Image: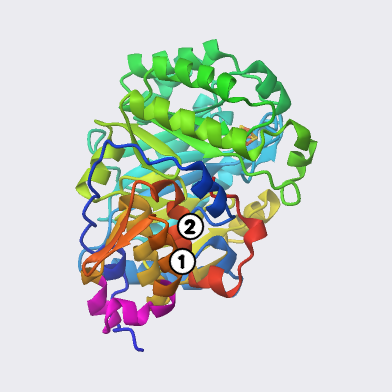
Amino acid sequence: MMLRSSGRSRRLNSDAPAAANSTPDAEPLFDADLLGRYDRRGPRYTSYPTALQFHDGFTGRDYRDCVADTNADPIPAPLSLYVHIPFCAKACLYCACTRVITRNRAHAAEYLERLVVEIARQAELFDTDRVVEQLHLGGGTPTFLSMEQMDHLMESIRQHFTLTPDGEGEYSIEVDPRTVSGEAVRRLRQFGFNRLSLGVQDFDPAVQAAVNRVQSEQETLEIISAARENRFRSVSIDLIYGLPRQTTAGFMQTLDRVLAAQPDRVSMYNYAHLPRQFKLQRLIREEDLPGASEKLRILQSSIERLTGAGYRYIGMDHFAKADDDLSRAQLEGTLSRNFQGYSTHGDCDLIGLGMSSISAAGACYSQNAKDLDSYLALVDAGGLATVRGVRLSEDDLIRRRIIRDLICHFTLDYGGFENSLQVDFWRYFAQERELLRGMEADGLVEIDAAGIRVTMRGRLLVRNICMVFDRYLREAPGHGRYSRAI
Ligand code: SF4
């Protein structure tokens, strides 16, 4: 079967938004037996195809060509910037991020020097009338940079890109409460950031000791207060369940203290214990990890507590207040997903800056060198820092949109796809239809003549439903590389 070539692949990225699913404030139904049965490893779908499909045959030249295609779109997409600051002063044992553990601040200076060069080189590729609507500084620990360095970084970004006004753009930074003061939060707001995200994970001292991340509740609450005083539009808190020495009772205490501070968003990540991939995780004693049923209890109690406190279940691991932009985007059908998780600016082309960062421009993903020395050397050599990536086929673009609609909106209408497919949706996806039968029988999805709906029973397993449409996973599973769904 042939796919109809659209000429402009972007149209498959940014077709009309999916209609939001019904019952927005209901909580997903929790069925421990069902979750246990479907608890398998799989991608988190921050991209499709996932990074496993990136290859080193994709070069900086390919990336430039893809960006040129996006500039030629009738209405080029706005831009989103992701800047990776890889340094951390201490290593948290659970961490799976690409980071450099060091206390030597000189590393930050030499890195920043190359980063501003890369910013200028990347900016040259994009038409100057394409504005930046979203910026995110992640890491590592972005606040490893001094405030002077942060000022310099933001100045460089403004020099080379046009940022939309504060009231319209989303400018966020990950903050480690152990490394910043209230005064630093004030400066960050002055530099233009309007959203703050804080890593907490768990306030329980036993858990903190077991993961080598000791962070007092007091220092976290002070940063939240400083963010409010300085009129940050949104504060989000990251928690992790499944950490060593965690119990349901202890985690509920953490959650209650977090909710008392009224963050706008709460992310509750499932700890992925992959010691073969992440060396430091080998220092975590397996016997300290909560068992599968305890993890399920933590998850169930947390969902009840969060939805009971008025937070909307966005999907996967995210919760947001009803008036937060993330909730609004889901209701309006404009929610998207990128490497930072759920996003309100899904129609943007994403420019990744810094070591290991990934760009998603038009029909490609392009990744920078993953280690510090290679990144510095590539920038010094005068080109881009691209080392691998992938160009998406028409089939990839269709499957990416299907996965996005399911994971963001819990719904998929065939109508928008049949033009591109040139055939009946289920003729093209005959194999997937068979795979969905079991899920339909288990009540995870409802399938009718108009589309697929993920039920309340299926919401916690939406990753598994997306996996059905992942051609690469089916052809070469590689499950060991992924975390478990629950
Ligand atoms: S501060 Fe964040 S990036 Fe750094 S080691 Fe800890 S979890 Fe990883």
In the picture, residue 282 is in which quadrant? top right
Which residue sits furthest bottom?
Answer: 1
Q: Quadrant of residue 225?
A: top left
Q: Which residue is mark 1?
A: 468
Q: Amino acid at mark 2?
A: Asn
Query: Residue 349: image x %, image y %?
Result: 35, 57
Between 69 and 253, the residue placed more toward the observer is 253
Question: Which residue appears at 53% of the width and 10% of the height?
Answer: 218
For the N terminus, the image quarter is bottom left
Q: Residues within 10 Å of mark 2 (few under 14, many from 20)?
A: many
Q: Taking the image as drawn, is residue 120 in sight? A: no
* Relative image position of residue 51 (x, y in whole percent): 55, 61
Q: Which residues are drawn in magenta?
A: 417-432
Residue 445 vertical placement versus 11 (above, below): above
> Is 50 contained in the magenta span?
no
Question: What residue is at 38 percent from the left and 55 percent from the top?
Answer: 443
